[in-house]
Amino acid sequence: MSELYDAAIIGAGPAGLRAAIELGKRGARVIIVDENPYPGGQLFKQIHKFFGSSVHLAGQRGFLIGQELMDSAKCLGVEFWLSSAVWGITDHTLAVLHEKNTHEIHAKKIILATGATENAISFSGSTLPGVLGAGALQTMVNLHRVSPGRRILIVGSGNVGLIVAYQMLQAGIQVAAVVEASDSIRGYGVHAAKLRRAGVPVLLRTTILAAAGRNRVETATLAHLDERQKLLPETAWQENVAAVAVAAGLTPLAELAWIRGCAFGNSAALGGFIPLHDADMKTSVEDFFIAGDIAGIEEASTAMEEGSMAGIAAAQELGFCSTEEKDREKKLIYQRLETLRSGSFGHIRQTEKIKIFTKMKGEFDEVRIDL
Amino acid sequence: MKCGLIYDGCLSQAETASVLPAAERFAKGPVAVIECIQDIPCNPCEKSCPHQAIIIGDNITAVPRLQADRCVGCGLCAAQCPGLAIFIVDASYSATEAVITLPYEYYPLPKEGDIVMGVSRSGAAVAKARVLKVRRETAAYGTILVSITVPKKFMHTIRSFRALREADKRIVCRCEEITETEIRLAVRQGANTVKDVKLATRAGMGACQGTSCRREISRIIAEETGASPEEILPPRFRMPVRPIPLAQLAAEEGKND
């Protein structure tokens, strides 16, 4: 029979790894489970340099940060189960498909750091091979080194769309354009500036109408929108592209939290329904923590801070660290999070997070799915 | 469409003016131009500077401020900026040329001495440039610094470069060796007659006096401006319409005396 772990972490991305490190270095027995064959979550395809504070790895490329986190977790004796999908949860037990069989993992604390999934959009031809998520394209090119074709289109000008477009250029793939339905660029201007210097147009108030081709994408039909976002069909034109990468935002992957009975809140700015949680990253369910994109779509640096917080809070409840130590660390973590959540890009997330914390205290109606 | 970083990904003229150090500073030698105007949480540039010339402070969403008198133009900030938004401009390089040092993350890397096409913030070809130096900083996690020489008047315009394309090498005016791209650039900068192009580029001012290139120049102007070819008039013709020895001119001069 399987043994009892102090903590089981689902998801070996930046949040899960940081949580594992904080628990591991305080002496907890930790297992981390991930459905992917490699740990690091999305970090290993991030070949660009991260923003943030230079005291916290800013300026370093994402995949190097992933390597560092993994090495530290492994040194601390954290157990890794990769290519292992958690498919069910009851109380303190996870059902895991591991090496072709279902195994149970029992743990005193469970930390859900499952991240997010890409939002798909539908248009004529959107099921053709060649229409894919921008993140998926990034994995395909940066990790598996498979080219989607000679020339591609990116839909969506958030940081994901802009960064993936730039990385396609670095891989020698032409980018016909980055199109954006709203009337300003959504991601960081400096990312857009790199594309513009390379001659890639960023087209605002523009949308994709259709993808077409025999057996796979060969063309994309685009058209402009007026200032009220109404389609202007007479402006339609075609681009010859082999792929259409959609960067239309992310949604937290929270199925296990729903099943476990967590109370949820909804925040459009944070990606939709997210489990309510407090500043310790504790959900409404005893012994059940969350961290990273599942707690609201942000970025790797905030995911790491939240992961540390969840790890330290769980360690304290397990008796591996004192309340004073936890409070001291928490103060530092929130100082850093506050900075990451400030400025015109971050302040909305700060406001929304506080709303989630407040809801957690029960001042607002909770959302539950009856099972 | 409105212009500015959030609308087209390029700094507007006003935004560009807001990030440029004073003109006197440029005359003194290389200096950083920090094209970072949004309040994003980031500060590696501040820490990278050995001369404390860049100030952000504890609130890392503050926009970096350059103390231009402290900056020596070493380029460490340009190599480390995750946004690739810092450029080093050296206006003191020569009387006619400036050096722009920019972060570069594409393969193949250029080689020193290569002639490339300098491009603007919007990727438009501006003028040919020469690669002066290709340098790898250890702290830059792979970002390469490439220094290119550009005509001084474009030192605030050129922000990247690309390899020369066929059209950049295709010569239209063979006497003066003026390429198709150079002519197109002149048209885009406002030269919409054959005469204007001639004045801007010297195309048509050589030994053949435009005999072989005139029609091509007209065609390119028509293409660029959308005018019909018959609207593009030839330049005003002047004597001598064929090359003649200077002595002949002198002899003619003598006859009139």
Image: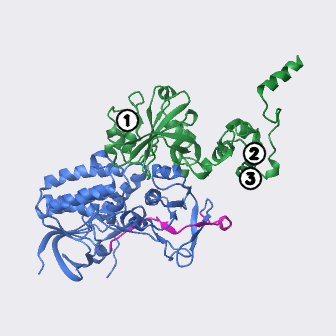
Calculate the distance from the C-alpha at mark 3 to the C-alpha at mark 2: 23 Å
Q: Residues within 10 Å of mark 2 (few under 14, many from 20)?
A: some
The answer to which of marks 1 and 3 sits earlier in the sequence is 1
Same chain for mark 3 and mark 2? The answer is: yes
Chain letter for green, please: B
Picture coordinates of residue A360, whole percent (x, y): 29, 64
Q: CA distance from mark 1 to mark 3?
A: 47 Å
Q: Chain of mark 2?
A: B
Mark closer to the chain start, 3 or 2: 2
Question: Mark 2 belongs to which amino acid?
Answer: Ser
Residue B255 higher or lower than A231, as above or below: above
2 or 1: tag closer to the N-terminus? 1
> How many neighbours does mark 3 have within 10 angstroms: few (below 14), some (14-19), or many (20 or more)?
few
Residue that carries the numbered disc 1 in the rendered image: B54
Image: magenta residue range? A229-254
Give the residue at mark 3: B226
User: Do the numbered discs 1 and 3 sit on residues whose CB atoms are within 8 Å?
Assistant: no
Pointer 2 with pointer 1, Cβ within 8 A: no
Kindly identify which residue carries mark 2.
B212
Along the viewing direction, whichever of A204 and B253 lies nearer the viewer = B253
What color is chain A drawn in?
Answer: blue
Is residue A45 depicted above or below B1 in this figure? Answer: below
Q: Percent from the top left, x then y, of residue B1?
A: 62, 52
Q: Name the residue at 60% across, 49% down.
A: B2
Q: In which quarter of the view is residue A257 placed?
A: bottom left
